[in-house]
Image (cartoon, rainbow, N blue to C red):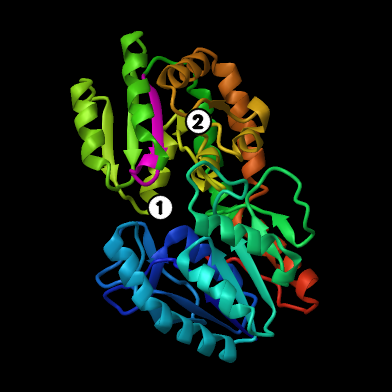
Amino acid sequence: MRLGVIADTRHHRDGAGRLCTIEPVAAQLEQFAAMFDEVVLLVPLWPGPPPAGFRPYRCTNVSIVALRPAGGTTARAKAVLALRVPAWAAAMRRLLRDVDVVHLRAPCNVALLGLAASRLSSRPRAAMYAGNWDGYDGEPMTYRAQRWLLARPSFGGPVTVYTDRRTAASHVVPFFSPSFTLAEWEAESAAVAQKVDALGHPGPVRLVTVGHLAANKNQATIVEAVARLRAQGIDTRLDVVGDGPLADVLTRRRDVLGLREAVRFHGRLPLDGVRDRYRSADFNVLASRSEGYPKVVAEGMVCGAVPVMSRVPMADALVAGGVRGVTFAGDDPDALAGAIASLASDPARVAAMVAAGRDYTRTVTLDAFGAQLHDILETHWGIVLPSPAVLPA
């Protein structure tokens, strides 16, 4: 059975000609590949070598129908997108003729067009909505349209979404976004135990934040909070992982605040490098204004980094109302500084949060993702699929 995947997930070819995408997405799509004879990706293929954080697929049954990339907020970008649409639509029609079932990864321009194209096909379909299912201020109209279309029973297949509330439609299934296997979870156990044993010992409070350096991720609030903590005499260090349009702005603000030695910018790192930062951190800070399922929070919990999160829709569920971490008002550096200072003064509370976070993340591994996805597709499509198998790391 052939699965077609329609998405805007960025892909590159490496020096050996292998197809590469960002590591967590590759791992999730490999779970699909374990259930189908072939997975055909209809995705943008970008020129040049893959950036840090990308890797090749570890399975041999994934192929690509390459789309010319397009998208953006400028008038020129929108004009280029309009020119791409006919070719994209034609490619989708051909894909839908050649595959047995189709999966859409929304929200994005490619998925919006795919929603329209797939309605003209009798192929069974499914979708994943990777954004904020509850909506947010300033949300693009196209995102709202995709949520509305996917929520309607007429979509005709299961839709996995990131939400902590019950959904009215039976085909809309709350889900999660993993990036680590059970074996990788188990491999962190000894290091986490050592981290817990060291709690309360003298040393700086170590923070990490991981994400695109853009307005929505709001790293400026975290930098400001570090300044406030240090002004209170709390030796605080911050590792910033990621790149993006605000890198220079954030670096200048760090320097103005006199934090050159306290705040380090690492740029984009491969997954192993990101995990090293989690391992060395006491607290994993997320100050985003909007999120779907922020997988970086779960990734940090695996390595014993307690989450301190802005109050995005999934935040309370992820921290379990204060059992696994804490939340704060996202644009308030004083509130963030206060939350971190309170936790840093209570090692026993932090140790309990580390243990609770580890218990939770054992339930949201790639293994669990594959098994639950398998059951969702079989139930909604009424077919029998091979059991998924996690590929070796």
Bounds of the magenta segment: 204-215
Up-down relation of residue 229 to residue 48 (above or below): above
Q: Nearer the viewer, residue 193 or 39?
A: 39
Q: Position of residue 78 (x, y in %)?
A: 34, 65
- The residue indicated by pointer 1 is 271
Q: Residue at x 37, y 62 (%)?
A: 54
Badge 1: residue crowd in 10 Å (few <14, some 14–19, many ≥20) = some
Residue 213's image quarter?
A: top left
Q: Nearer the viewer, residue 153 or 253?
A: 153
Up-down relation of residue 386 to residue 239 (above or below): below
Q: Residue at x 51, y 59 (%)?
A: 142
SS under mark 1 = helix
Decide if residue 322 is on the left or right side of residue 392. right
Q: Let me know if residue 14 is in the magenta part.
A: no
Q: Amino acid at mark 2?
A: Gln
Q: Position of residue 154 (x, y in %)?
A: 73, 70
Q: Residue at x 38, y 28 (%)?
A: 222
Farthest top residue in view: 232
Give the mark nearest the N terminus, 1 or 2. 2
Question: Foreground mark, 1 or 2?
Answer: 1
Decide if residue 268 is on the left or right side of residue 329. left
The N terminus lies in quadrant = bottom right
- The residue indicated by pointer 2 is 194
SS under mark 2 = helix
Q: Let me know if residue 211 is in the magenta part.
A: yes
Decide if residue 120 is on the left or right side of residue 328. right
